[in-house]
Image (cartoon, rainbow, N blue to C red):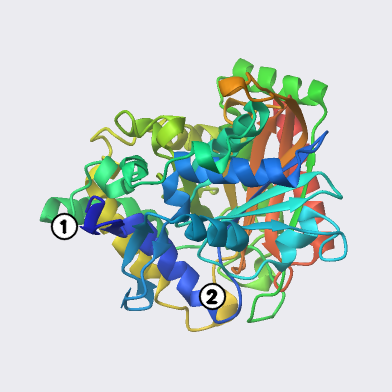
Amino acid sequence: MPWQQVFPGCYERKFDSLEAFYLTVTASTIALEKQHFHVTCTVRFQSLPSVDELRRAWLALRHRYPHIAARPSDDCNGDVPARFVYTVPSTADLEAWMQETLTVVNALAAPSAESLFETFPPTALVKLYFLPHTHELCFRAPHWRLDATSMMCTQDALLQILADGPPSLGELVFDGSEAARLPPSLDEAGGVPQEATPAILRAVEEELSVLKAEGPHLTLPTRPNVLPGTTRRYGFNLPHTSTQQIIAGCKARGLTVTTAAHAALALVMQRYAIHDFDPATRGRPGGKFTGLVSVDLHKYLPAPWNEPATAASPYHSGIPISVDLDVARDFSAIAASLTPVYARNLGQDSPRNLFTILAEYERQCTALLAVPPPDPLRRPAHAELSSIGIIDRHVRPQYEGVGVGGRNSKTYTLEDWWIASEMTGRYLQMRLWTWNGQMHLGVNYNEAFHEATFVEAFVAEWRDVFVENIVV
């Protein structure tokens, strides 16, 4: 359903299938003061903006992307809110929103954005945290509000506003005209059918079949805890030379960097994994490497919803994969098995048009998650890859202002960029991206289920297997 004005100054729309999926996942962890998949994205400045400049830029970002100020409704469908609500703000409303969503953090409250990430409480809002003592700016949002691409697009816009010289409150008009910039849901933008025809039901069954197939499925051994603890982030940047060698090696093999990294991950997973939760099978060859691949759907949408200026909404999904390691036994064979997955055009009917089945697909994924295993220690515990690509396409290492409207412009240089998500599950969320000429390999994990020494060794081995199979 599109945004509709329900009374003067108030606009609403229902949550779509993807948002409902993430809201359901979130609802299952809120009671634990956790928020699964909550996204945190941080930049570190070389030189700082002032707090006043940041406040004005944050308000200008709200004007450009009013969606970041929309709120979930109080009424619910089951355990999740029913609708998004955007209200045209008064001056007092804007100040209250600023106080609620923009926080200046001192060194006593959090020594770094890293420590802040580990202690964030749940929230339904898009928030910004400024740490002057570490020169860090930390963006935070639930995954049902922003995905990695939309997070980077809003980040890029804020940084450019700062560089150009942020406008004053008097230059921004909040009169309801900004509601025209509220983005549609993925279901609306992608023309997703809401009714499940027999053909759609068959296609969804085919899409999910690899997740429902008989094993043996590989899983990582985990610590025997039931409740999640603190989410941790670990990783490292490869040197510029190594990054270029990997990119060249992938091109020479006819592989994307993501495909090659995923093949290396499957090999490392096999070395550590057990089959169907049986500890006696640790390290045994073979089995099925099963999981989900994150897919960015922004590029498939019609203009203007495929453009950065309108991208402040989650337009993505995940598709199942399964590699039979009894058949694909080495790096080349695994990469060959994964290549069609990453080459798939999700807007075409062969093998399935994801947009045609998306609403029913998300509903069935939600239903699958709602059925807990008989033993909570047997929840999925594999290594899953999220490849974000080349970050510079969205967030540049340097922002030069152009002095819009006679305002004082500046140049801001960024020294670091990272993204992470809160994890309450037993699996490892592996991370891959390239920024400022350096490739990053990393992971988000929950310390209740994995020891830091194991995770660090796992990521290091992933890097080594990746490099040794690609760099000649």
Circle 2/circle 1 CB separation < 8 Å: no
Left or right side of 277 for 48: right
Residue 248 visible (yes or no): yes
Residue at horizontal 32 percent and vertical 34 percent from the top: 301
Q: Quadrant of the C terminus?
A: top right
Residue situated furthest left in the rendering: 198
The one of 450 and 402 positioned closer to us in this rendering: 402
Picture layout, residue 172 above or below residue 121:
above
Query: Mark 1: which secondary structure?
Result: loop
User: Residue under circle 1?
Assistant: 196
Q: Indicate which disc, 2 or 1, sits on the residue closer to the N terminus.
A: 2
The one of 7 and 239 positioned closer to us in this rendering: 7
The answer to which quarter of the image holds residue 239 is top right
**Residue 165 pos. (x, y %):** 64, 30
**Residue 277 pos. (x, y %):** 59, 71
User: Residue under circle 2?
Assistant: 29
Residue type marked 1: Ala
Left or right side of 284 for 201: left
Left or right side of 9 for 38: right
Picture layout, residue 389 above or below residue 328:
above
Query: Mark 2: which secondary structure?
Result: helix
Residue 345 visible (yes or no): no
Left or right side of 142 for 81: left
Residue type marked 2: Thr
**Residue 323 pos. (x, y %):** 50, 47
Residue at horizontal 67 percent and vertical 28 percent from the top: 163
Q: Nearer the viewer, mark 2 or mark 1?
A: 2
Give the crowd class for mark 2: few <14, some 14-19, many >=20 residues within 10 Å: some
The answer to which quarter of the image holds residue 116 is bottom right
Q: Quadrant of the N terminus?
A: bottom left
**Residue 400 pos. (x, y %):** 68, 21
Mark 2–mark 1 distance (CA, rounded to whole Å): 29 Å
